[in-house]
Structures are given as structure tokens and as C-alpha cells.
Amino acid sequence: MLGIRSIRARIISIVLSQSACVLAILIFAAVPRLRAQEALVNSRAAIAVDSLKEIGAKKVVVCDFSGPNGVTALGINLADEFSASISHDANGTIDVVDRAKVPEVLHQLGLEREHADSALQGEIATQQLSADSFVSAKLSVDGDELTIHFEIHRVGKEIPADKIEASFTLNAQQRNLLNTEFHDVSQSPYPFAGSEGYSTPQCIYCPNAEFTDAAVKKKAEGRVVILALIDAQGRVANLRPLVDLPYGLTAASMKAVQNWRFKPALDANGMPTEVRPTIDVVFHTW
């Protein structure tokens, strides 16, 4: 007859064996899914490399993937993986910029990573790192399905986003990363407009910037992006260009915005306060 200790030992052994089998089943079930997702993203990286070659790209930056609610830990991880895949597939034919340099240039300009979406990061990084192209992406979620909408940009040329797209089912870890908001180290003592309980200043006197003669002659178009400091009285206290345009349009934008007046932003207590918004000054020739 088996003793009580022996019976308990056998029961524990059986339970552990059953648990190990369940764990093994879960692991083997998860591995094919993860490999399928990796293969899917890698296949899109190969398409991206072909597209970059078609538009003559020589140096490319892969920016943080943003959405559906700003920059998340998942968006950063996916961008890291995609950048590595592009570098591998390009095999030296395209210079893929180290992604660690993207937050570095943002910080140098006084901007936190989560306050620049994927496309804005690309515009900034392209100019600051002397690249000619960048890859941005937006993430959208429908139930458990995540879709990555890639965009490939070249200065003056763009491939429509619907040409490169990837969808897969989120696992528990990816869902957790998607729900994890990214918070960069603050680059200013002043809060960013529209975040952490602060509202956004509302423009009440904002005349258009004037085209320069050189810009008119060249039919220049595009946008200048400016990081501003708007004080508690709604006045422009400081300006810094983030994205430039040639032919004097950056200086024209700064001159115009310096004279703008705003309804000041409010803090969580409803009091007027200083905040940092980004301002787009758009130039069209039509």
C-alpha cells in the first residue's frame, strides 16, 4: 500500500506533467503565429526596399509607427523590426539610418518622441540626418486585428500608402504593448499643448505668411512646421523651426507666426497657462 506522502507525490507529478503538456501545446501553438507575423512583416519590408530603389532612395529613415492613439511601445518595437528587415533586404544598396538617431534629433530640437507622429518624425529626421527618404506607418485596430499602413516618402515624391499594408491578429503581449503609452524624457519645463490635461491655444489673429519672390518663381509648395511657446496671455514667446522649406519660406513663416495672437491654453484647473504647440504653415500655389 502506498503511503500518504507517496500518493501525494504521484498526484503532484501527474498534475505537473499535465501542466507541462498544456504549456508545451500553448508554446507550439504560439510559435507558428509569431513566425507567420514575422514573415508577413518581412515580406512588406522586401516590397518597401523595391519601392525605395524605384524612387532612387539612397538613405532612408524608419520612424516610429504611430496610432491608433499616438506613439506606443508596440509602434516603436514594430518600427525597430521593420528597420532591421529593410537593412537586411537592402544588403548595403540603401543606407538605413540607425533608429536611435531619431529621438536624438527630436531632443535636440526640444521635442519629445510621443509629440511627433510618424510622418512628422520623418520630415524632421530626413532634414536633420541628411536622408532623402523615410518610412512612416499608422496602426489601426479592428477587434483583435492590427493593420499597419506603410507610407514611403521621398523628397518631392510619394508612394500611396495602400500599396504597402500588413494585417495580423494581436497576441496578448502585443495587445499590452499597444495599450502602453510611451512617455519620453521631457525636453522642456513647459507642457506640450493638448497633453496631460492641458488644452491647445486657439488662434484668434493668424494672417497667412507671404510667399517670397523666389518661392513664387520656383512654384514652391509644402509646409513649415514650427515648435512654439505660447504664453498665458496668448502671445508668441518663442519659436523654433522643426521642418524647413527653401526660398525664404521658413523665415517668412517665422515672421508671420511671431505676430499671431491666441486664446491661451488652460491647465487642468481652467487657468491660462504657457504651453508648447506645433504650428503648421502651409504654402500652396493654386
Image: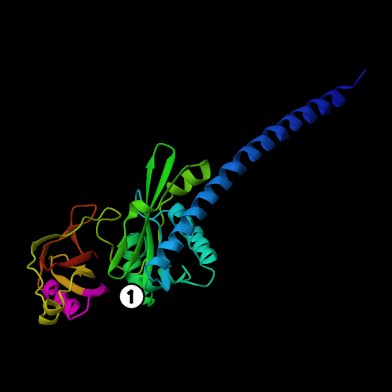
Q: Quadrant of residue 131?
A: bottom left
Crowding at mark 1 (Cα within 10 Å: few <14, some 14-19, many 20+): some
| Depth order, front residue of 131/286 | 286
- Work out which residue is located at the far top of the displayed protein and give it: 1
Quarter of the picture containing the C terminus is bottom left
Q: Position of residue 283 (x, y in %)?
A: 15, 68
Q: Residue at x 18, y 70 (%)?
A: 221
Q: Amino acid at mark 1?
A: Gln
Left or right: 155 in relation to 229: right
Q: Position of residue 266 (x, y in %)?
A: 19, 56
Q: Residue at x 83, y 28 (%)?
A: 9
Question: In the displayed structure, would residue 175 be above or below residue 48?
Answer: above
| Depth order, front residue of 244/161 | 161
- Work out which residue is located at the far front of the displayed protein and give it: 54
Quarter of the picture containing the N terminus is top right
Left or right: 175 in relation to 191: right
Q: Position of residue 19 (x, y in %)?
A: 70, 32
Question: In the displayed structure, would residue 101 be above or below residue 78?
Answer: below
Left or right: 49 in relation to 261: right
Instruction: Identify the magenta region.
Output: 239-258
Give the residue pinned by disc 1. Answer: 127
Left or right: 185 in relation to 227: right
Q: Quadrant of residue 107?
A: bottom left
Element at label 1? helix
Residue 241 is one of the magenta-drawn residues: yes
Q: Position of residue 166 (x, y in %)?
A: 43, 48
